[in-house]
Image: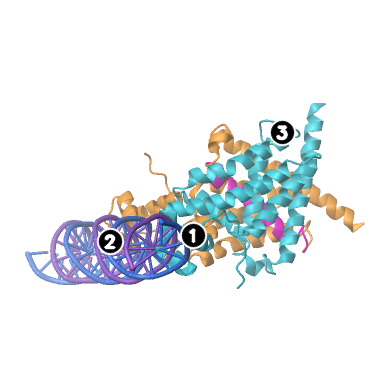
Chain colours: A cyan, B orange, C purple, D blue
Amino acid sequence: MARAKKINRSRPERAIQILDAAAELMGELGYDGVSARDIAEHAGVNKALVFYYWGSKPELFEKVLERYYHAHRDALARAFDTPGSTTERVHRVLDAYLDFIEEHRIYPRLVQQQLSGGGPHREMVRKNLAPFFHWLTELLSEIAPSSGPLAARHFYMSISGMVTSYFTVAPVLAEQWGSDPMSPAALAERREHLHWLADTLLSGLQQQTAGEEE
Amino acid sequence: MARAKKINRSRPERAIQILDAAAELMGELGYDGVSARDIAEHAGVNKALVFYYWGSKPELFEKVLERYYHAHRDALARAFDTPGSTTERVHRVLDAYLDFIEEHRIYPRLVQQQLSGGGPHREMVRKNLAPFFHWLTELLSEIAPSSGPLAARHFYMSISGMVTSYFTVAPVLAEQWGSDPMSPAALAERREHLHWLADTLLSGLQQQTAGEEE
DNA sequence: AAACGGTTTGACCGATAGGTCAAGATGATG
DNA sequence: CATCATCTTGACCTATCGGTCAAACCGTTT
């Protein structure tokens, strides 16, 4: 199996191996489903090294999440910070979001685990989600009302839910899905679906607000 | 604190107490975040009773999930099995879905934990989700193509993601949400948002398919 | 070759996990 | 009152958890 290059800040090589192993296992099996021994073994390293480099298991998890977080934020910041109409920018952000998740499929799983499990890392997850919430709210502020059922914050919830849930739900429903939901073709089709959704929602929103302004 | 009546099959009272405690704690803290001791303590019962009535921790969890599952299926089955146009029925299903989740807010958390954590209960979760997937697919089959980016299965993913993610994400983002996302007023607003979304998507879908048929 | 800082190891620790069990309580039936 | 099945308990077991530590390793510098 080829070892994919990950997003790595400059750190001892061994430390990065451990971080990679932790990310992979925690993403698959959950934070509590993986022991420090498992991580060390999977990284081909003595267990004590895990603590030598990363202090404790919660700290290790934070570093795993932080690494994804920075990459995620950078990727989406670039997409938000582009010229064009609101619609164009929304589509660009959506593509950037999907690009990132497709490259790091573990990330939404890690986040969802913390969100639904109420672990000790919820504050960190909140910090991770906050900028995107803020950006999308600002991005939609031109065409969405500031309160009520069509407020931007609702669209943030809906869109992020639609995007991420595919990566947690679809694998489980693979059998009745028909084809492999994670194949490149299936992912491309999903992307099309989401772009269509975004288009439909945005134009519906514009009609609505235009109609109410009269 | 008033003890709310839960969905209970006929079983010894003590056994139900334990099941209730397990559901509550596992929903809040996650399957691995809760010990048999915690559950027993929270139910005001000796720890050995947990195993006397429910065998093992995984079996206990299955029973927790199963209880919600049956109630969930019944509630939605009734909504699916109503007369009217596709649009009307979709709205009815959506309302039934929201009614159920609002009454049992722990349920989507439990499901999401298993979906994202890859625990040993994924097969059970799959069994839980399968009928809804099937029903919604059938319901939308009249107006959605059977394959491609607008296929019914995509809408299932999108809609269920939008609905459930609110209950896992919103609490974490409560601070920047402004008001309490779980207050009755906020839940009503969320419901309006989702109905608007469903309307917009369905009419967009009908336009699309009507245009292609020409 | 001695001394040194960063790295790596295996052996060990207390705490807690899920689970068992034999013995007691309890309440209905003869 | 004795019996019997169901229920309830505290004491106990083993396995594993996250984490520690002193000693060994190793490449550099003096």
**Disc 3 chain ID:** A
Residue picked out by circle 3 = A141
| Three-letter amino acid code at the position of disc 1 | Ala
Q: Are discs 1 and 3 less than 8 Å apart at CB?
A: no
- Same-chain check, marks 1 and 3: yes
Q: Secondary structure at mark 1?
A: helix
Q: Which residues are magenta?
A: B147-171
| Three-letter amino acid code at the position of disc 2 | Ala
**Magenta run includes residue B163:** yes
Q: Nearer the viewer, residue A148 or A44?
A: A44
Q: Secondary structure at mark 3?
A: loop
Gap in angstroms between the C-alphas marked 1 and 3: 43 Å
**Apparent side of residue B162 relative to residue A31 in the rendered image (left or right):** right
Q: Mark 3: give few (<14), some (14-19) or many (20+) Cα within 10 Å.
A: some
**Disc 2 chain ID:** B
For the image, the number of numbered tags is 3
| Three-letter amino acid code at the position of disc 3 | Ser
In which image quadrant can residue A148 be found? top right
